[in-house]
């Protein structure tokens, strides 16, 4: 091994008496008396304790700043005071020589390495190379490597070929803003970084490849969230020819559970078949299309029972939902805090009342509910000591607020959430179309490349006015785990005639389709197989496996929430010469 005979996590009692050479970072120095010191040396594999008993070596060590890299030659001996918490805790090394390999020139570090996760995030990202020295932070990156290797192995075993697709491509309307790259040799024209390899993987299916996958980099100019990194992310992109929704489900239900059970923080994961929930049912029952099935709470519609009460928010056509939290011991102060947090996340205020030990209604909006006591008790199966969250609003607002109530109260009230498991489900039967909030006209609801359930026939019926286009569903599906959307996928619309008719529904004709998707449209005209695919997010997957709340914890060099790499100084200004070569002028706002 280069510059060493052993790593800092390798030596054991069997090595006592050996002369060894170690190399690593000097993590800590602890002096005991005048001529004795303990030094901890750390490398990628672990730590080893040195015992400095030589006066000259002690003077040398005292002149070395922590986090300098050093090389140590010495002899292994048994420790008198063992540390059972360390793999190397039964031995120590008595050095005969120490050499500085890389000097740390600063007496003070931005943060203590082993407590870097407690530091300000800006400092952590600025000095990410120091943050990654923390074994706890480094372990997440190791986990990421192991998971990607396991995913790749599983996909190859299922007969998939790993094929890379272009990074420089054409701008395409896929739902998010593109990152544009100016084309130096083509003034005024731009490449775009792919939001996903969507079109390329479909073109591979038309090319005769049967099963494709890659750990694909994707680029989207969108804002950060706890479970979404700005700028770039990676996904397990896959596509199958001559395949149905059931074929895609079978692959992921075979690939993912063993990986989650082996590498996850929790060792219990759903087994096949995963639960399937219709999109409309998910919104009605859980208030979200990303339900966390570890929580046993659901929402119930009580609009018909309370629409004639004197409480104004429940009137005038509002939808009213109720969430019952049984055996709730929260205080009034805790309930008020819970409702305030829900309002922040949902954008609407929830209401509440509770049942006392005798089953009587008390607190919150109870006075408006008392007249409906019997009906509510029967509808909601109420018993003593229940907290009832009530949400109201038009459109989907009542559902959304109920969903947040389920999420936060399920986590806050003991007994309603089994945290230590991974619960998967499929969300199916997504609507093909919706009314756009800004346009007020019919638009694609999700993926325009999805096959409408019922094919051309259902589109023609909508065109003739025989059915409402909003009732058309798509052969599209989402994979959800613990309330996190891991992936969207679909059976693709591979028939040019059906594709054109689907786009005509949103006021785009054949020429528009040819212009926006020329390669795919033309390829489908040469005989395309039915095909389907999906692309689980690798970053989100590893975040769940590591038990982290922020996706930045499992990315080696993440951007901050403002899409800035403060370690490298990106984005940055470029020279006038560079802009001139690209035929670009920057104008001040």
Image (cartoon, rainbow, N blue to C red):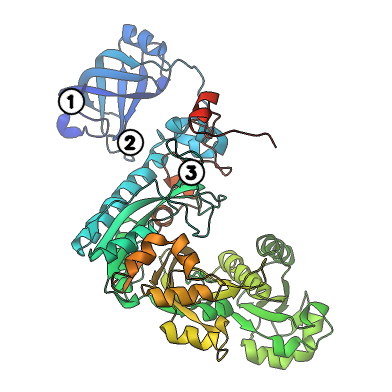
> Looking at the image, do the residues carrying marks 1 and 3 touch, with CB atoms under 8 Å apart?
no
Indicate which label's residue lies in the foreground, 1 or 3. Answer: 3
Front residue of this view, candidates 399 and 112: 399
Residue 157 appears in which quarter of the rendering? bottom left
SS under mark 2: loop
Q: Is residue 471 above or below residue 259?
A: below
Q: Residue furthest top?
A: 56
Which residue matches tag 2? 83
Front residue of this view, candidates 10 and 483: 483
Indicate which label's residue lies in the foreground, 2 or 1. Answer: 1
Query: Within 10 Å of the Cα at label 2, are there few (<14), some (14-19), or many (20+) other Cα atoms?
Result: few
On residue 5, the disc is 1
Q: Residue 569, image x and y in percent?
A: 52, 30
Nearest to N terminus: mark 3 or mark 2: 2
Which residue matches tag 3? 189
- Say which residue appears at 74% left-offset and 63% top-offset: 333
Say left or right for 27 vs 164: right
- Say which residue appears at 28% left-offset and 38% top-offset: 87
Q: Residue 430, image x and y in percent?
A: 49, 76
Say left or right for 105 vs 412: left
Front residue of this view, candidates 1 and 466: 466
Q: Residue 263, image x and y in percent?
A: 32, 55
Nearest to N terminus: mark 2 or mark 1: 1
Q: Residue 454, image x and y in percent?
A: 42, 85
Residue 238 can be seen, yes or no? no
Residue 576 appears in which quarter of the rendering? top right
Query: Within 10 Å of the Cα at label 1, are there few (<14), some (14-19), or many (20+) other Cα atoms?
Result: some
Q: Disc 2 to disc 1, how far (Cα)?
A: 23 Å
- Say which residue appears at 55% left-offset and 89% top-offset: 464
SS under mark 1: loop
């Amino acid at each position: 091994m280069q510059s060493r005979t052993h790593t800092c996590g390798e030596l054991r009692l069997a090595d006592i008496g050996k002369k060894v050479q170690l190399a690593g970072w000097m993590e800590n120095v602890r002096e005991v008396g005048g001529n004795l010191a303990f030094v901890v040396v750390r490398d990628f594999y672990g730590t080893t304790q040195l015992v400095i008993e030589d006066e000259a070596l002690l003077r040398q060590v005292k002149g070395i700043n922590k986090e300098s890299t050093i090389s140590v030659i010495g002899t292994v001996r048994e420790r008198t005071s063992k540390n059972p918490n360390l793999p190397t805790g039964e031995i120590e090394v008595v050095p005969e020589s120490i050499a500085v390999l890389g000097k740390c020139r600063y007496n003070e570090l931005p943060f203590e390495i082993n407590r870097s996760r407690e530091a300000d995030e800006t400092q952590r990202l600025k000095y990410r190379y120091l943050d990654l020295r923390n074994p706890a932070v480094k372990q997440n990156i190791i986990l990421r490597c192991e998971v990607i290797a396991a995913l790749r192995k599983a996909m190859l075993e299922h007969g998939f070929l790993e094929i890379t697709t272009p990074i420089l491509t054409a701008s395409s309307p896929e739902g998010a803003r593109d990152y544009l790259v100016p084309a130096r040799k083509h003034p005024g024209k731009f490449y775009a970084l792919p939001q996903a390899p969507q079109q390329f993987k479909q073109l591979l299916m038309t090319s005769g490849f049967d099963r494709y996958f890659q750990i694909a980099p994707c680029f989207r100019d969108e804002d950060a969230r706890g479970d979404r990194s700005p700028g770039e992310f990676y996904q397990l992109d896959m596509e199958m020819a001559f395949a149905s929704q059931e074929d895609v489900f079978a692959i992921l239900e075979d690939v993912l559970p063993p990986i989650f059970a082996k590498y996850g923080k929790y060792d219990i994961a759903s087994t096949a078949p995963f639960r399937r929930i219709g999109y409309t049912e998910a919104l009605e029952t859980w208030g979200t299309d990303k339900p966390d099935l570890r929580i046993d709470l659901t929402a119930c519609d009580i609009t018909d029972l309370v629409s004639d009460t004197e409480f104004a928010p429940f009137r005038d056509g509002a939808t009213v939902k109720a969430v019952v939290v049984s055996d709730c011991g929260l205080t009034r102060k805790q309930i008020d805090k819970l409702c305030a947090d829900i309002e922040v996340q949902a954008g609407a205020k929830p209401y509440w009342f509770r049942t006392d030990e005798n089953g009587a209604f008390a607190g919150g909006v109870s006075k408006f509910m008392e007249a409906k006591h019997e009906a509510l008790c029967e509808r909601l199966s109420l018993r003593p000591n229940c907290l009832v969250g009530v949400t109201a609003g038009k459109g989907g607002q009542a559902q959304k607020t109920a969903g947040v109530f389920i999420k936060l109260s399920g986590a806050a009230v003991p007994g309603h959430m089994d945290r230590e498991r991974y619960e998967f489900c499929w969300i199916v039967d997504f609507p093909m179309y919706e009314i756009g909030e800004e346009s007020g006209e019919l638009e694609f609801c999700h993926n325009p490349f999805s096959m409408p359930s019922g094919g051309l026939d259902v589109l023609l019926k909508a065109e003739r006015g025989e059915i409402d286009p909003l009732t058309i569903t798509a052969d599209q599906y989402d994979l959800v785990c613990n309330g996190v959307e891991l992936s969207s996928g679909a059976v693709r619309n591979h028939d040019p005639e059906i594709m054109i008719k689907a786009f005509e529904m949103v006021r785009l004709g054949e020429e528009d389709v040819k212009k926006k998707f020329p390669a795919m449209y033309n390829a489908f005209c040469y005989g395309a197989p039915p095909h389907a695919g999906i692309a689980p997010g690798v970053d989100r997957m590893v975040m769940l496996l590591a038990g982290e709340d922020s996706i930045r914890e499992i990315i080696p060099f993440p951007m901050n929430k403002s899409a800035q790499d403060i370690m490298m100084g990106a984005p940055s200004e470029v020279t006038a010469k560079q802009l001139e070569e690209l035929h670009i002028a920057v104008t001040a706002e």
